[in-house]
Image: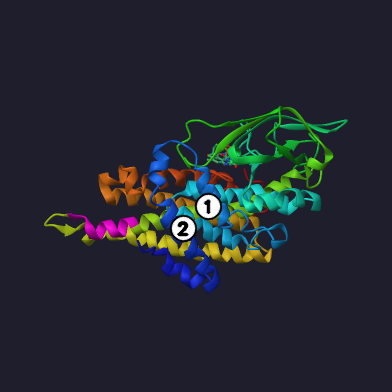
Amino acid sequence: MERYIDQHLAHLVDPDRFAFYKTLCQFADREIAPHVVAWERAHKLLPDAVIAKMAHLGLFGLTVSEEYGGQGGSITELVLAGLALGYYSQSVAITTGAASSLGTKPVQIAGTSAQKKAHLPDLAAGKRMFAFGLSEPGRGSDAGNPEVKAERVAEGWKITGEKCWSTNAHWASHVVVHALTNPQGANGQRTTCFIVPTQHSAVTVQEMGGKQVWPLSSTGSIRFDGVVVGEDAVLGEVNQGFRVMLNTLNGGRLLIAALALSSLARALDLCRNYAQERTQFSDKPIGRFQRVQDVILDMDIALHQGLAWLWHGLALYEAGTMPRELAAKIKIECTRRASDLLTLAMEICGGVACLDEFGLIQHHRDLFVCRVGEGSNFVLKTLATKPLMPNIELQ
Ligand SMILES: Cc1cc2nc3c(=O)[nH]c(=O)nc-3n(C[C@H](O)[C@H](O)[C@H](O)COP(=O)(O)OP(=O)(O)OC[C@H]3O[C@@H](n4cnc5c(N)ncnc54)[C@H](O)[C@@H]3O)c2cc1C
């Protein structure tokens, strides 16, 4: 099936990057599309063989410099991969995407030379992954004040508490843990990040059961029962951990916006095809009804607008000049537009949209996590409103 999104992308992306994107689309057509419904029905995580194929394509090292065995690309490559793979399955796209944007990124931002040498080559090769340990059972949006704590001990640091919602936990060799180290410190100076191995007797990783979004993606809770790590496990500066986490999330939010657009792109193609094939009332296609046309056109407009704004954000991100609120606004707009439109997309397809094999229902579910993950849209709205009203304290 032709991807109509390509009409827009071809004007935004240079020819080399467009060719890279098309290669990944072909991979997705061949390796993901024919199997994804069966994988989801099996209620298992993404097969290791698929992860190995994606590693072979270099998808885990897109943003890692060549010095460490990566492709030396940027966030734009990551977003293009998200668009290409997410078209059939956000689960597949988030597995490689989060491995880079949440797993590898903190090491790239804040790692010492020794930490980079120890981890980046394996991460770039997809031999192992890192998980991003920010959220906790009692600390979601209020992630700046973790209950997980790290105390100084003779050998280094002792970490206690629990993280949850950690993407890729099942495949993670390590988790970057955001822990309270300075309870009396000022806002943003209370916490430190640590690189903690998951294969440790004082660390327990458990897959979170019952999750209905991103079904092929691993989402784990990780408990730390007084695990002791050395000084060399500190990632970045002591008591500056929140900055590492926030800087990581800026890029991640652009990727989430891309995943929302990948779902919208798929819905647009399924709907415009269906509206031309499905006949009702005198055996004429339902696409002749203006209310059906409205939905299809709105999807295309939202897709085109979302991509243009996303590419604006990517350019600023790569130039190092993107304000935090811009990533928040792009994520809010792309995810809410896509998920609102997905409901209408399903409505114009009627009952068949309820079937997994039709291809819309899982995207509909996955768009919910796009609204909530990497900072819920409600919370991000406060962040994005701050520059508009700098003289009052917003809540
Ligand atoms: C599938 C999945 C994967 C995830 N992956 C990761 C991961 O890899 N690593 C990680 O650390 N986390 C991860 N998360 C966690 C995610 O980032 C959190 O769910 C998110 O930050 C929201 O936290 P919460 O769910 O605890 O909601 P809460 O913080 O409890 O918020 C509940 C509601 O209250 C609203 N609310 C809270 N505070 C405010 C406020 N100040 N202003 C306005 N509204 C507010 C929220 O918007 C939301 O609607 C993942 C989540 C999911 C579902």
The residue singled out by tag 1 in the image is 53
Q: Residue at x 36, y 48 (%)?
A: 360
Q: Amino acid at mark 2?
A: Phe
153 and 385: which is toward the camera: 153
Q: How is the image coloured?
A: rainbow
Q: Secondary structure at mark 2?
A: helix
How crowded is the residue under tag 1: few (<14 C-alpha within 10 Å), some, or many (20+)?
A: some
Of callouts 2 and 1, the N-terminal one: 2
380 and 321: which is toward the camera: 321
Residue 255 against residue 354 in the figure, above or below: below
| Image side of residue 379 versus residue 267, left or right | right
354 and 227: which is toward the camera: 227
Tell which quarter ligand 1 is in: top right
Q: Residue at x 55, y 37 (%)?
A: 219
Q: Is mark 2 within 8 Å of ligand 1?
A: no
The residue singled out by tag 2 in the image is 27
In the displayed orientation, state which residue is furthest to the right.
154
Residue 237, given in percent of the width and then of the height, sits at 81, 46
Whether the residues at callouts 2 and 1 have beta carbons within 8 Å, the answer is: yes
Q: CA distance from mark 2 to mark 1?
A: 9 Å
| Image side of residue 319 versus residue 50, left or right | right
Residue 274 included in the magenta stretch of the image:
yes
| Image side of residue 259 versus residue 200, left or right | left
Q: Residue at x 62, y 42 (%)?
A: 395
